[in-house]
Image (tube, grey):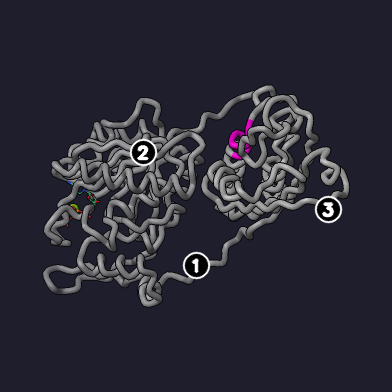
Amino acid sequence: MTVTPTPRIAVIVVAAGSGTRLDAGGPKALVGIDEHSILRHALRGVFAAPTAQVVIVAPADREGDALTEAYAAADEADAVHPLASGRRRDLVGVVVGGSTRQRSVAAGLRALWADVDVVLVHDAARALTPAAVFERVIDAVDASGAGVVPVLPVIDTLKRVESDAVVEAVDRTSLTAAQTPQGFPRPLLEAAYAAAEQEFTDDTALVAAHGVSVRTVDGDERAFKITTRGDLSRAQMLVTEQPAARAMSREPAPPAPAVLPRVGVGTDVHAFGGDGELWLAGLRWKDEPALSGHSDGDAVSHAVVDALLSAAGLGDIGSRFGTSRPEYAGAHADVFLDATRVLLHEAGWRVGNVAVQVQANRPRFAARRAEAEAALSTALGGAPVSVSATTTDGLGFTGRGDGVSAFAVALLLPR
Ligand code: CTP
Ligand code: MG
């Protein structure tokens, strides 16, 4: 069997420019669009991509501000789409840029970790670049092994002029407008930078001058570069989602989500008669008889796990965390729920909400219901969980007090 290694992707975000044309009284990347800076907005797209390292190239003396922005963006992304591998903060580094964009990229290249093998270079000034553009570029570098630039067709009719006189029309069919992020296999980009003897306006031009062709993928209208006051106004309108801004950007209305929410159900039953203390709904219940089971017998959290797995079509608790797995012996709700959340995340889902009902004579949930909801919700990364409890009027095995039964429904949303 051959194993294809997953490329380790770094994004260099160049943010060291002074913003002469914007003329906002400070470095452009730290100018606000709304309550957030251009850099902070740019990092939203960056952190949504599957990156292993993010190098921010900051203006001299503003590394601290850049790091603050980066941490805020990293935490925001963690809250929405937690990574199984850890916090996005740990991916971030800040270096000081140079006097030209090319020198700033070179500074970023020097900060790459040894195991990075694909590099994307992105202008912070293209603050509203959607995550999909990053994904397209990464996929194309991965598939082709070549450099990749996102492009848009040129819409305007073009003229070559001398002084103020039109000399000739320029055929626009073979022209495109280059955007960022531009992605490259690391050895290619480093070799091209080492060989460059003049200034180029972007990395595609620099690599092309090195004699290596670069491929194109579709860019996006929202990846426009904030250069002038007019561009900043356009960005301001887009982030406040004014309909006028959408019309101005010639952007079609966003399509309906292709993936619909999904619901799932789960039940679980455990008999009293286990060793030790009772664990139910993620809580320890002192002085209550324990439930029996391979893990802690927590029927409530197991029903929740089953509902979540069923909604995602990922099987059930037995097939995922069965009795053959010694690491789950004696495990509590937080272990199962966290592992389930990771499975869901990897399959493209996040938890919308969960409702679970427990049928039992004891323990009495009324006094600890909020505590149980908080424990289960925390273990699921903050999704709302509601817990209700009932007795069965003395009927059945729960009515006889032989055990506990739980029934859960879950709603999943596409990530
Ligand atoms: N950039 C950089 N280092 C430089 C110059 C530019 O990191 N010495 C970055 C900018 O921060 C920007 C991107 O390169 O994100 C594209 O540059 P541009 O839009 O031209 O930004 P500025 O150079 O800041 O603007 P201006 O040319 O108007 O001064
Ligand atoms: Mg510039």
Farthest right residue? 396
Residue 138, how many percent across, how many down? 45, 44
Q: Is residue 367 above or below residue 321?
A: below
Crowd rating for badge 1 (residues with CA inside 10 Å; few <14, some 14–19, many 20+): few
Name the N-terminal-most of marks 1 and 3: 1
Residue 296: in magenta span? no
Residue situated in front as seen by the camera: 412 or 198: 412
Name the N-terminal-most of marks 2 and 3: 2
Task: Tell me the CA gap for discs 1 and 3.
Answer: 52 Å
- The residue positioned 67% from the left and 29% from the top of the image is 277
Residue 323 placement, left or right of 40 = right
Residue 334: in magenta span? yes
Q: Which residue is mark 3?
A: 393
Farthest front residue? 287
Crowd rating for badge 2 (residues with CA inside 10 Å; few <14, some 14–19, many 20+): some
Label 2 sits on what residue type? Answer: Arg
Residue 375, how many percent across, how many down? 56, 43
- The residue positioned 18% from the left and 50% from the top of the image is 17
Q: Which mark is residue 254?
A: 1
Name the N-terminal-most of marks 2 and 1: 2
Residue situated in front as seen by the camera: 2 or 317: 317
Q: Which residue is mark 2?
A: 89
Magenta extent: 332-337
Residue 232, how many percent across, how many down? 25, 65
Task: Tell me the CA gap for discs 2 and 1.
Answer: 31 Å
- Assign a secondary structure to mark 3: loop
- The residue positioned 40% from the left and 27% from the top of the image is 115
Task: Tell me the CA gap for discs 2 and 3.
Answer: 53 Å
Q: Nearer the viewer, mark 2 or mark 1?
A: 2
Label 3 sits on what residue type? Answer: Asp
Residue 16, how many percent across, how many down? 20, 46
